[in-house]
Image (cartoon, rainbow, N blue to C red):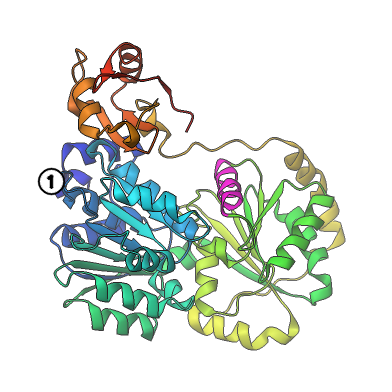
Amino acid sequence: MTFQKYQLSSEIIQALDGLGYTEPTEVQEKVMADALGRKDLVVKSQTGSGKTAAFGIPICEMVEWEENKPQALILTPTRELADQVKEDITNIGRFKRIKAVAVYGKQPFAYQKADLKQKCHVVVGTPGRVMDHIERGTLVLDRITYLVLDEADEMLNMGFISQVEKIINHLPKNRTTMLFSATLPDMVKKLSQKYMNEPKNIVIDSDVTITDNIDHSLFIVSEQRKLELLRNVTVVENPDSCIIFCRTKDLVDRVTDELEKFHYTVDKLHGGMMQDDRFAVMDEFKRGEFRYLVATDVAARGIDIENITHVINYDIPLENESYVHRVGRTGRAGNKGMAISFVTPNEDRFLAEIETFIGFNIPRRDMPSQQLVAEAIDAFTEKLEKLPKLKKDKSENLNKDILKLYFNGGKKKKLRAFDFVGTITSIPGIEAEDIGIIKIQDTVTYIDILNGKGPLVLQEMKTKTVKGKLLKVHKAKK
């Protein structure tokens, strides 16, 4: 089974090869033919199952490059997930020159408005900011043919239902709608019945991710002894990469401070942080620059990181679905993972609800003995002092033949994409297919040069003019 069976264009196949996508996952296999056939779909699938590519590949295949207005809208519950999906769409559509834009709060509206004014094929965003752009007329919807509701259960859990409905009511009626969700509560079902056209229901067996690949366990512990238990459990388990979930940002700060006292390589992630700081932490954790991430539930979405070996629920979640989303950070892509929960004696009701929801009782564990901790401390300290092996980004191989160039001219010099393409393709050996995404801003322009031809274009453009203007050109810093 390969992606060739879907008769995808050579540009999409080239990108999938570069990303290391050799054969479809179960969700991709069950979704892609119907998505390419423009059928409405309701898909129940755990995170980590490859669902972004399941809708991303068909969207990149079906959008028309020549159309300047957005043709696909993807709604996500969090800013992290919006940014992740935008990157995935950009990578899949790299050689077709698909332009994806992410819009979300805590980022300047003007920057997003400028992005949306340019040629743009796919918009990914959180409901609040997408609605802002619709109301201000900066997001044009009349060419939207595809709508994706990603992590729909979490979107509705976070209170976005009225905004999602408002957005849907602004969209063209003649469209393909795909809804993806790890769980299907009644609110999600009602949404699909109300706004979708005879959707096909696809269920990816969740047992594969929540029980087969993940070892679940819990400790009954008083609130006062949680920090001591966390220290002992991490020493005994000695994880390679671990997320510790807390309910509040204040507790995230406190737990992070405590672990730093013991020289853990640790950082934190919560909604009170600046967005740029959140992205920086995420990028560093993805690369493996530190082993322990302490986070609120904001981090249970949008983290697509391989080889997270342990998830520790320092606090058990109050929402049943959140347990599924949290533990879904581990045991991904066929790897084994461990989900360990700390439960206080007065949280038995919440625990019972979670166990009913997931369909099994979580095994109880005894506290690690002092002897066990003492026996494990040397190996733990050795790993703590050793630099983690940095992980490669999955797009690294794809991007190795791509060079992003900077030009010191843009809209204010009345330069258009057409002007750059004409000049660059006048260089012997350069075809239009060698030019990737062009991003023209007010005073600068960024252009991706594909197929390893960047150095040639960089050299030649030092002496060539664009629309009669000689521009400074160099390798872009970003």
In this orientation, which residue lies closer to the viewer: 243 or 472? Answer: 472
Q: Position of residue 213 (x, y in %)?
A: 49, 60
Residue plotted at (32% across, 61% down): 74
* Left or right: 237, with 105 as reference point: right
Q: Does 344 sit above or below residue 383?
A: below
Query: Does the stretch in magenta take in 285?
Result: yes
| The image quarter in which residue 247 lies | bottom right
Circle 1 residues within 10 Å: few <14, some 14–19, many ≥20: few
Residue 44 appears in the picture as rendered: no
The residue lying toward the viewer, choosing from 175 and 185, is 175
Name the residue that disc number 1 marks. 7
427, above or below 357, in the image: above
Whether residue 160 appears in magenta in the rendering, the answer is no
Count of marks, rendered view:
1
Residue 429 percent coordinates (x, y): 20, 14
Nearest the eye: 43 or 176: 176
